[in-house]
Amino acid sequence: MFPILICEDDSRQLEQITQIIKQYCAIYQGRFEIALATSNSAKLLEYINEYNIQGWTYYLDIDLGQEMNGIDLADKIRTIDVTGKFTFITTHEEMAPLTLKRKIETFDFIAKHSNDYLKKQLMTNLELVYNRFIQQQKRKAITVVRFKVGNICYKLPIDDVVYITTSDKPHRLTLYTKRGKHEFYGKISEYEEKCLELTKVSQSTLVNFDYVDMFRVDKRMIVFTNGLHVECSKRYVMEIKNKMQGINI
């Protein structure tokens, strides 16, 4: 999971932002976790210094009502966390150019308008942050799938894999390619960790969306370009719909 840090001096708005992020986390379990939500900028700095944080996600108010404002805080954080992602949630949209001048490399600005507006913008922001993290990980991910059938070791390009699923036979997996299939001993969890190009659609199946032709929402059925199909779990329906609509690319 990717950790989130929040700093907002208004207790009501801090609670509101925290609850929206928790709602997102409840929908998409395993993506984010709130490591710290505070109204005290010094406490946040103390936290990241203690844990030597790198690459975390920050939601900061600009007007913190303290000695340092949110931009000052982000500037100090940047000296420690050089790859962190900053989103400012603020009524001071006119201060956006200042973040460029200070070279903070801001990820996003969200205006404090209505509650519904804030929720919509924050949900969209979280989805985008998550996708960027996944893209970064994919660049480091393996580009081949390795497995062994009997005494023969295979190494297939990840682009050739249509999907991997658990076999009817105990402790075995079935890997479907463009040209056929292979059955071998293994755990789906191992390939979920290694093959970030594949998307989990159930506890037993990983899918390459490059080969998905359609998604039958009513039947929770994913149909591939070669005519094969698998069923997804109910909890993954929204994520799959977003992928098919080009949101989660």
Image: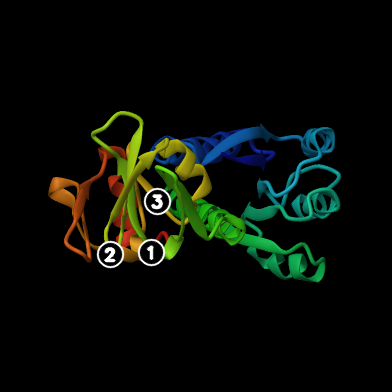
Amino acid type of the residue that numbered disc 2 sits on in the rendered structure: Arg
Q: Which residue is mark 3?
A: 199
Furthest residue in direction front, as rendered: 151
State the image quarter where residue 109 is shown.
bottom right
What is the secondary structure assignment of the residue under circle 1?
Answer: helix
3 vs 1, front mark: 1
Q: Nearer the viewer, residue 163 or 106?
A: 163
Image-quadrant location for residue 200:
top left
Kind of element beneath mark 3: strand
Using the image, determine if residue 234 lies above or below residue 135.
Answer: above
List the residue tagged with mark 1.
160
Within 10 Å of disc 2 (Cα), the crowding (few <14, some 14-19, many 20+) is few
**How far apart are the two marked residues, 3 and 1, measured between alpha carbons?**
15 Å
Residue type at numbered disc 1 = Asp
Residue drawn 45% across the image and 41% down it: 24
**Which of pointers 3 and 1 lies earlier in the amino acid sequence?**
1
> Do the CB atoms of the residues marked 1 and 2 lie less than 8 Å apart?
yes
What mark, if any, has residue 179 been given in the picture? 2
Check disc 2 and report its element: helix, strand or loop. Answer: loop
Q: Nearer the viewer, residue 121 or 10?
A: 121
Mark earlier in primary sequence (1, 2): 1
Identify the amino acid type marked 3: Thr
